[in-house]
Image (cartoon, grey):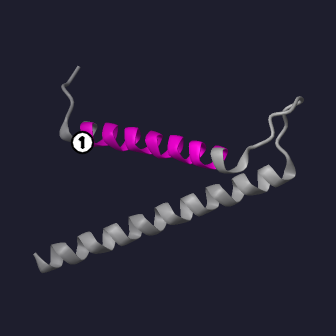
Amino acid sequence: KMPYSVFDRVDELHQKRALVRVNELVDRCFDQCIDDFSIPRTLRTREEQCVCACVQKFLTLSMMSGQIFATAMQQEARNG
């Protein structure tokens, strides 16, 4: 088997970072939205709406921050 290349390592880091982001999303939205643990445990309409809004907000902010970072990197590369 060939040793890891730099690209393999970068890919591995991206995957780990993505997993961390998903875990952050789950923790944040669960803590914010889920508050009823009665039996039988099903997602209440209010909780489901909250989770959907939380996920949408998280994804939107993640995309915006990625775009801002990419723009800043492009400007920095041009300005050298």
Residue at point 32% right, 40% down?
13
| Crowd around label 1: few <14 · some 14–19 · many ≥20 (10 Å) | few
Place of residue 11 in the rendered image (x, y in percent of width and height, measured from the top left): 32, 41
Magenta stretch: includes residue 28: yes
Residue at point 36% right, 44% down?
14
Of residues 71 and 61, the one nearer the viewer is 61
Magenta stretch: includes residue 14: yes
Q: Which range is magenta?
A: 9-30
Place of residue 15 in the rendered image (x, y in percent of width and height, measured from the top left): 40, 40
In the image: residue 16, left or right of residue 51: left
Looking at this rendering, what residue extends furthest in the top direction?
Answer: 1
Residue 59 lies in quadrant: bottom right
Residue at point 63% right, 49% down?
29
Looking at this rendering, what residue extends furthest in the left direction?
Answer: 80
Residue 5 lies in quadrant: top left
Residue type at mark 1: give it.
Phe
In the image: residue 74, left or right of residue 50: left
Residue at point 63% right, 55% down?
55
Q: Which residue is mark 1?
A: 7
- When the figure is inspected, residue 27 is found, relative to residue 71, above or below; the finding is above
In the image: residue 58, left or right of residue 17: right
